[in-house]
Amino acid sequence: MLRLGILSSLDKRDVMMLPKILKQDIRLRTLSRLTSEEMNEVRSAIQGLQVLDIDHVHESYLPWLAWWFRVDTWNDAWPLERKRAVVKNGLTLYKYKGTIWAVERALDLTGFDPKLTVWHQMNPPGEKGTFLVEATQEQGGLTQKDYENVVTLVESNKQGSQHWNMIVRNPLSRGGIYAGIHTRSRKRITVTLMD
C-alpha cells in the first residue's frame, strides 16, 4: 500500500529524468521523488543564470557582458537603461567598426547627440580622409572623463586612416565647461556654448 501511495504522488518531471530501464525500479523512483525538492531548486537556479538575456539579467552582470560584447567604454555611473542599451549594441558596433555610423552610434549611446560630417560633405570641402564630430551634450559640462570617453569611442570606431576634429556644444543654461581639455596631435576639439 505504501508503495502505491509513493508511486501515485511521483512528480512526472522527476520520473522523466530517469532512463527508461530505471523507471521500472520502485526504489529508484522513490529516491527520485525524495530528491525532487533539491532538483526543483537546481532548476530554478539554472533559470536564474540566463545572463545573456540583457533585459532581465542582474545589474551586476552588465560590466562582464560589456567586456564580453567588446564595449569600448563603460561608466558605472550610467543609468541602468543606458548600460543595458550599450551592452545590447556592443556586438553591432563591433561588426561595423570603421564606419561613420559606428562612430555616431557609439557617441549617441553614451549620452552625446552627435552629428558627423565627412570631408566631402563639409562646406567648403575639408581635407581628404577627415571628418568633423559636432556633439551636443545635454547633461552638464564636459568633464575630463567625458573627454576621454569621446576620444576612446571615436578612435576605436573610426577607420584607422581617418583624422578628426570635434566641436562640443554645451547649453549655456545647464552648467560650465571643463577648462582643462587635453588635446592630442591628430585631433582638435573646440568647445562652444549654445545660445
Image (cartoon, grey):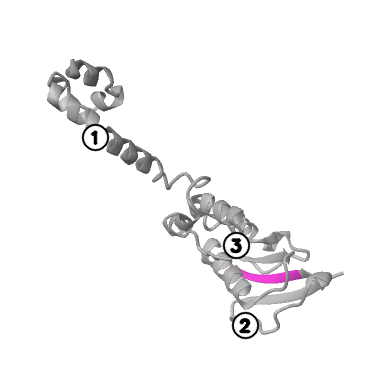
Q: In the depicted view, which residue is nearer to us: 35 or 60?
A: 35
Query: Label 3 crowding class (10 Å Cα cut-off): few <14, some 14-19, many 20+?
Result: few
Find the residue positioned furthest to the right. Answer: 195
- Amino acid bearing label 3: Trp
Do we see residue 116 in this rendering?
no
Residue at the image position 23 percent from the left and 18 percent from the top: 5
Which segment did they paint magenta? Answer: 163-169
Q: Position of residue 148 (x, y in %)?
A: 58, 74
Say whether disc 2 or disc 1 marks the residue closer to the N-terminus: 1
Q: Position of residue 2 (x, y in %)?
A: 19, 19
- Amino acid bearing label 2: His
Which quarter of the rendered picture does the N terminus lie within? top left
Q: Position of residue 146 (x, y in %)?
A: 62, 71
Task: Describe residue 151's horizontal placement relative to residue 171 as left or right.
Answer: left
Query: Viewer-nearest of labels 2 and 1?
Result: 1
Q: Which residue is mark 1?
A: 35
Q: Which residue is mark 2?
A: 182
Say whether disc 3 or disc 1 marks the residue closer to the N-terminus: 1
Label 2 to label 1: alpha-carbon separation = 64 Å
Residue at the image position 51 percent from the left and 45 percent from the top: 56
Q: Which residue is mark 3?
A: 78
Q: Are marks 2 and 3 in contact (CB under 8 Å)?
A: no
Query: Viewer-nearest of labels 2 and 3?
Result: 3
Residue at the image position 37 percent from the left and 39 percent from the top: 44
Label 2 to label 3: alpha-carbon separation = 23 Å
Label 3 to label 1: alpha-carbon separation = 44 Å
The answer to whether residue 94 is above or below residue 194 is above
Quarter of the rendering containing residue 155: bottom right
Quarter of the rendering containing residue 41: top left
Q: In the depicted view, which residue is nearer to us: 67 or 188?
A: 67
Q: In the depicted view, which residue is nearer to us: 151 or 7?
A: 7
